[in-house]
Amino acid sequence: MSRSLAWMKRLAMIAIGYIAAVLTSILVPVLLIVLLAGIEDGNWSIIFTFDWLASFPLAVLTVAICALLIVGPAIVLAERLALRGWFYFAVTGAITSIAFGVFVPGSAGGFVFNPGFLGFLAAAGVAAGWVYWRLAGHKSGHPAGGGPR
């Protein structure tokens, strides 16, 4: 396989991993909130909880663009230094998720400094980092996951 084709394949895997991580970072807090609300209220009807699905595509686009500004340099660093540990991506995801919630206006509403909400954000970031690591991060620094450079 030619080197340029290998790098194009690698870039495609990075993009797929990133989009999957973005979807995970949005779904994890929603599902945690639904679960906790169901436990607290005893109401397990999640039909009404998913009224946010109408705005889901806009949320994905917003998170994908804004979070890339934060996590993009970390992905480039991982590729350049061949960082492949899951812990790197989990911590990077948590930091990115918390930074997104704190710095992007309106993303966190009035919950920004609520430790419970920051915990939701951190959990979402760790899950997103793990998903990215499973899809693309464990082969960082190698074109198409091939041998050493």
Image (cartoon, grey):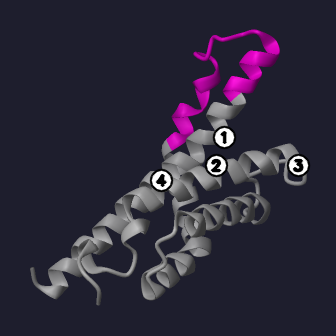
Task: Report how far apart the C-alphas of labels 4 and 2 lie in the structure.
Answer: 11 Å
Magenta-drawn segment: 34-56
Q: Is residue 56 above or below residue 25?
A: above
Q: Judge from the rendering whether residue 101 lies leftward or rightward of residue 19; answer left or right.
A: right
Q: Secondary structure at mark 4?
A: helix
Q: Judge from the rendering whether residue 34 lies leftward or rightward of residue 84; answer left or right.
A: right
Image mark for residue 131: 4
The residue located at (85%, 43%) in the rendering is 116
Q: Secondary structure at mark 2?
A: helix
Sequence-wise, the earlier of marks 3 and 2 is 3
Count residues near mark 4 (Cα–Cα under 10 Å), then give few for <14, some for 14-19, many for 20+.
many
- Amino acid carrying label 1: it is Pro
Circle 1/circle 3 CB separation < 8 Å: no
Q: Residue under label 3, please give it.
A: 115
Task: Report how far apart the C-alphas of labels 1 and 2 lie in the structure.
Answer: 6 Å
Sequence-wise, the earlier of marks 4 and 3 is 3
Q: Residue under label 1, please give it.
A: 29
Task: Report how far apart the C-alphas of labels 4 and 3 lie in the structure.
Answer: 24 Å
Q: Secondary structure at mark 3?
A: helix
Circle 4/circle 3 CB separation < 8 Å: no
Sequence-wise, the earlier of marks 4 and 2 is 2
Task: Report how far apart the C-alphas of labels 1 and 3 lie in the structure.
Answer: 14 Å
Kindly tell me whether residue 62 is visible in this rendering.
Answer: no
Kindly tell me whether residue 6 is visible in this rendering.
Answer: yes
The residue located at (52%, 55%) in the rendering is 130
- Amino acid carrying label 2: it is Ala
- The x and y percentages for residue 135 are 38, 58
